[in-house]
Amino acid sequence: MQRRSVLASALGALGALLANGCPRAPLEPARASAPPPAGDKHAPVPSARGSTAAPPPPGPWRPRSEVAVTGGVHGDEPSGALVLPELEALGFATFGPCNPWGVAHHARELADGRDLNRSFARDDVPEVAAVQRFLAARRPALLLDLHEDRDAAGGYLIQHGPDDDLGRRIIRALGDEFAIDPEPSFLVVHGEDGVLRPSATVLRMVELSRFYGLAFHAWLALGITTLVVECPRGWPLAERMRWQRRVVETAHALLGPPTGAERDARAPR
Ligand SMILES: [Zn+2]
């Protein structure tokens, strides 16, 4: 591959990545030892597709309030914003709809026509500032931004945090329950088996592009793993909402205990 074309494509892809996603607001008390996600497919998340994966952790390790969930960045992707109230009631830290005008008008963009999810490097967008205040106040250990994709063949995740395998473990846990997109892609950034994980180099280019969205911003600002959660817009709404809910629950169940680096990163400065 040509380096120049890869860079150019990566920048575009990054913008697109950031352009996919959405958040909202309240938060809740935590349940330090809540049981794993409800449902029947939950047992221990054995290494379904890997032969040497370690046994699943005994989690959940964290209160749900350490997991932030955003929705409604794109107003024409309703499932994310619609599941926020119930996630909030469960104790997750939620914010949304991030683009209230878009949700009210069933429009992807903000009232002024800009795409909120490409605007997180800007300082003149009130909707961006609102999300930034939420993140600064919560300082979550993980963020999931809920979206829908018109062209997806199944559910998939875009993970910011190239050294983390959380996205892969979530897909393993849910792979028998939902159709998973086998080849998710954003321009030249390609994933496989339901996970698209831009490399550190690509993420750096996105940063330089100043053209990025909520999940990228949260990864950059807080140093945490963030996931853009995508599902086909063609799924029935109830199924899209179930996917969003199950991904959030599963992410919480699989999120490990705080690492030393995380404690340092999250310590007051
Ligand atoms: Zn979206």
Image: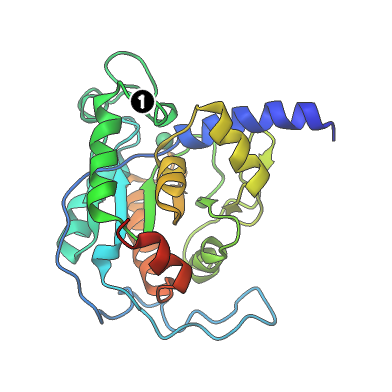
Location of the C terminus by quadrant is bottom left
Regarding residue 74, the answer to whether it shows in the image is yes
**Is 184 rendered above or below residue 172?**
above
Left or right of residue 140: residue 185: right
Regarding residue 14, the answer to whether it shows in the image is no
Q: Identify the residue shown where x is 45% and y is 73%.
A: 259
Confirm or reject: label 1 Cβ below 8 Å from ligand 1.
yes
Residue 24 x, y percent position in the rendering? 23, 43
Residue furthest to the right = 1
Q: Quadrant of ligand 1?
A: top left
225 and 49: which is toward the camera: 225
Disc 1 packing (10 Å; few <14; some 14–19; many ≥20): many
43 and 87: which is toward the camera: 87
Residue 164 x, y percent position in the rendering? 56, 63
Q: What amino acid is at disc 1? A: Arg
Location of the N terminus by quadrant is top right
Left or right of residue 236: residue 131: left
Q: Which secondary structure, mark 1?
A: loop
**Is 163 rendered above or below residue 97?**
below
Say which quarter of the image contains residue 189: top right
The colour scheme applied to this rendered structure is: rainbow
Residue 51 x, y percent position in the rendering? 70, 81
**Is 267 rendered above or below residue 154?**
below
Q: Identify the residue shown where x is 45% and y is 36%.
A: 20
Left or right of residue 104: residue 119: right
231 and 115: which is toward the camera: 115
- How many numbered discs sit on the rendered protein? 1
Tag 1 residue: 108
